[in-house]
Image: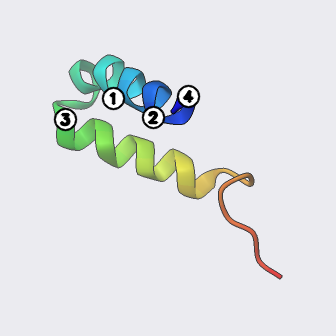
Amino acid sequence: MKEREGSVAFLARQAPLAGGEKGALEDMCLSLLSSSEFLYVD
């Protein structure tokens, strides 16, 4: 639940900066894909 709350808060803060909700979601997806903690390759 902690991750969900953080994600919702990020989207709310980022939306005005990114040109709307779609831009904020794109920013969050890019951040997640760039994170070494999100993807692991064996």
14 to 3, vertically: above or below: above
Residue found 33% across the figure and 24% down from its top? 14
**On the image, numbered disc 4 is attached to which residue?**
2
For the residues carrying marks 4 and 1, which lies nearer the camera in this image?
A: 4
Q: Residues within 10 Å of mark 2 (few under 14, many from 20)?
A: few
**Could you tell me the amino acid type at mark 4?**
Lys
**On the image, numbered disc 1 is attached to which residue?**
11
What SS does tag 1 mark? Answer: helix
**On the image, numbered disc 3 is attached to which residue?**
21
Disc 1 and disc 2 in contact, CB within 8 angstroms: no
Q: Position of residue 2 (x, y in %)?
A: 55, 28
Q: Position of residue 7 (x, y in %)?
A: 43, 32
Q: Residues within 10 Å of mark 3 (few under 14, many from 20)?
A: some
Q: Which is nearer the eye, 5 or 30?
A: 5
What SS does tag 3 mark? Answer: helix
Residue found 73% across the figure and 52% down from its top? 37
* The quarter of the displayed image where residue 41 is located: bottom right
Q: Position of residue 9 (x, y in %)?
A: 39, 20
* The quarter of the displayed image where residue 20 is located: top left
Distance from the alpha carbon under mark 3 to that under mark 4: 21 Å
Residue found 43% across the figure and 42% down from its top? 28
41 to 2, vertically: above or below: below
For the residues carrying marks 1 and 2, which lies nearer the camera in this image?
A: 2
The disc, 2 or 3, on the residue closer to the chain's N-terminal end is 2
The disc, 3 or 1, on the residue closer to the chain's N-terminal end is 1
Q: Is residue 13 left or right of residue 23?
A: right
Residue 4, numbered circle:
2
What SS does tag 2 mark? Answer: helix
Q: Which is nearer the eye, 7 or 1?
A: 1
What SS does tag 4 mark? Answer: helix
Disc 4 and disc 2 in contact, CB within 8 angstroms: yes
